[in-house]
Image (cartoon, helix red, strand yellow):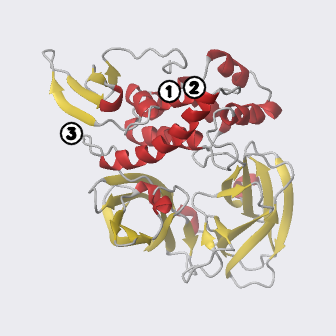
């Protein structure tokens, strides 16, 4: 079943009739059905559509010698990204994680492949974006720049999701070095993570009053203090403090525990630094971590508020966009929350399903359809965001003009969209523009 996001969002307003309340419950059923149909939908070509999505973090660490650095690659696969099969009274899913490392010349230097199996007794878990698996693989490398390619393959559907991450371990080869920072959940520990499991991607919730940040450092002889600062994303200093390391070994591992400042908004940054004798900003050894602070009803797929507002153009009325764009900074976040609260099918629960699905499709579009512009701004991105994965795709179609064509068909809405690559560079445009009474295509 295909979920028409445009229709689902457009029918929700502040004042609800009985019929619209009924639609809310229908939407919830459609949300679950969409997850299942996205995994089982029939497609020809363009196999990456419906592939597993996942989060990646690749922190670098100094070692006891300047000649080597350690790279840990964390991969978080949510359960709703993989296909579960019912076996007896349980649901099982199998997938493979392949990590490939390329050097600065794009030559392969490492490749690790591991298989994983997930088992749950509850169907609700199989379609949950919050539940999932976290895996880690480590590499010992020389300090330098690398490219990390992560591929997750669902063993049932044989579809593969792919992410590419640039890694810079150059600073790990300096005498004084601080690792990349990792946010930990100290209430959730594992055999390989006795201090707490990494939170991937890094985010807190409104009931969190403190953050716990893990770091490793190689300290020059005579180092007495490390400096900690809590900043806004705009680099406004909210709090600052020092950590006494005068009695620590040259190579140290520790956790920073800091209370969240009252002024922290939807995103903030924690900075850990080692100042050298010159006291010049360019000589400071700095490691920083941007953390998303999720409020009630906020989706984890939003990383920047201004970008999230801009991306509403496909579903927001013109007066709503004007209000959001003209909002003062101290009101912008509240107005954004109100926009989505008016479209929340389950206002009594923390999660807003429509918001989550909308921005998840935007993230997917950015990964799959981006060219010279962000994927969500492309014609394919717009259709995917509004209507989800198509039921059928015809590719490598050639017209009399010699151009490449693709046709996406959605059976449940009896609608097809034909895309054409006019310039031959893979930048597909709609043959017949989609006209919406609500939002509009990016210009």
Q: Which residue is mark 1?
A: 7
Residue sticking out furthest to the front: 18
User: What residue appears at the point 58 percent right and 81 percent down from the top-left corner?
Assistant: 64
What x and y, as percent, mark residue 70?
50, 73
Q: CA–CA distance between discs 3 and 2? A: 33 Å
For the residue pair 259 and 224, the one nearer the viewer reads as 259
Where on the picture, by quarter, is residue 202? bottom right
Q: Using the numbered discs, state the Cα–Cα distance from disc 1 to disc 3 in whole angstroms.
A: 26 Å
Q: Can you tell which mark lies on residue 11?
A: 2
Mark 3 or 2 closer to N-term? 2
Say what secondary structure mark 2 lies in.
Answer: loop
Residue at 80%, 27% (x, y): give it: 328
Is residue 23 in view from this perspective?
Answer: yes
- Element carrying mark 3: loop
Q: Provide the residue designation for mark 3.
A: 44
Q: Nearer the viewer, mark 3 or mark 2?
A: 2
Residue count near mark 3 (Cα–Cα under 10 Å), binned few <14, some 14–19, many ≥20? few
In percent of width and height, residue 309 lies at 64, 30
Question: Percent position (x, y) of residue 264?
Answer: 80, 49
- First along the sequence among labels 1 and 3: 1
Image position, residue 60 (x, y; %): 54, 66
Number of marks in the rendered image: 3
Residue 134, compared with residue 356, is above or below; it is: below
**Mark 1 Cα-neighbour bin, 10 Å: few <14, some 14–19, many ≥20:** few
Cβ–Cβ under 8 Å for marks 2 and 1: yes
| Mark 2–mark 1 distance (CA, rounded to whole Å) | 6 Å
| Helix, strand or loop status at disc 1 | helix
The outermost residue toward the left is 400
Left or right side of 341 for 116:
left
Q: Quadrant of the N terminus?
A: top left
The image quarter containing residue 104 is bottom left
Classify mark 2: residues with Cα within 10 Å, few (<14), some (14-19) or many (20+). Answer: few
């Amino acid at each position: 079943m295909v979920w028409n996001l445009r229709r689902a969002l457009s029918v929700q307003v502040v004042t609800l009739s009985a019929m619209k309340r009924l639609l809310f419950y229908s939407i919830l059923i459609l949300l679950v059905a969409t997850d299942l149909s996205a995994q089982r939908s029939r497609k020809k070509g363009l196999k990456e559509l419906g592939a597993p999505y996942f989060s990646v973090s690749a922190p670098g660490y100094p070692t006891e010698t300047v000649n080597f650095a350690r790279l840990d690659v964390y991969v978080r696969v949510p359960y709703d990204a993989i296909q579960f099969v019912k076996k007896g009274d349980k649901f099982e899913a199998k997938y493979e994680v392949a990590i490939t490392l390329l050097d600065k010349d794009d030559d392969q230097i490492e490749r690790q492949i591991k298989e994983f199996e997930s088992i749950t007794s509850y169907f609700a878990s199989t379609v949950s974006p919050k539940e999932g698996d976290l895996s880690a693989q480590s590499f010992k490398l020389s300090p330098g720049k690398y490219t990390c390619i992560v591929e997750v393959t669902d063993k049932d559907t044989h579809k593969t999701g792919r992410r590419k991450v640039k890694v810079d371990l150059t600073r790990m080869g300096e005498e004084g070095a601080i690792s990349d920072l990792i946010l930990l959940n100290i209430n959730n520990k594992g055999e390989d993570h006795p201090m707490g499991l990494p939170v991937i991607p890094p985010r807190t919730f409104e009931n969190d009053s403190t953050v716990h940040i893990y770091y490793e450092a190689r300290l020059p002889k005579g180092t007495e203090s490390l400096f900690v600062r809590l900043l806004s994303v705009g680099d406004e200093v909210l709090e600052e403090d020092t950590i006494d390391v005068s009695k620590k070994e040259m190579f140290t591992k520790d956790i920073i525990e800091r209370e969240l400042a009252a002024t922290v908004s939807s995103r903030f940054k924690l900075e850990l630094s080692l100042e050298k004798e010159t006291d010049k900003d360019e000589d400071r050894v700095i490691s920083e971590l941007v953390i998303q602070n999720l409020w009630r009803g906020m989706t984890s797929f939003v990383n920047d508020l201004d970008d999230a507002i801009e991306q509403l153009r496909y579903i927001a009325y013109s007066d709503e966009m004007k209000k959001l764009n003209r909002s003062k900074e101290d009101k912008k976040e509240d107005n954004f929350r109100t926009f989505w609260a008016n479209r929340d099918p389950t206002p009594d629960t923390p999660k807003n399903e429509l918001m989550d699905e909308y921005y998840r499709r935007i993230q997917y579009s950015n990964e799959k359809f981006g060219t010279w512009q962000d994927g969500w701004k492309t014609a394919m991105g717009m259709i995917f965001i509004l209507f989800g994965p198509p039921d059928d795709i015809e590719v490598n179609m050639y017209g009399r003009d010699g151009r490449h064509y693709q046709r996406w068909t959605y059976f449940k809405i009896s609608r097809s969209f034909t895309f054409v690559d006019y310039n031959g560079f893979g930048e597909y445009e709609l043959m017949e523009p989609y006209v919406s009474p609500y939002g509009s295509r990016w210009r």
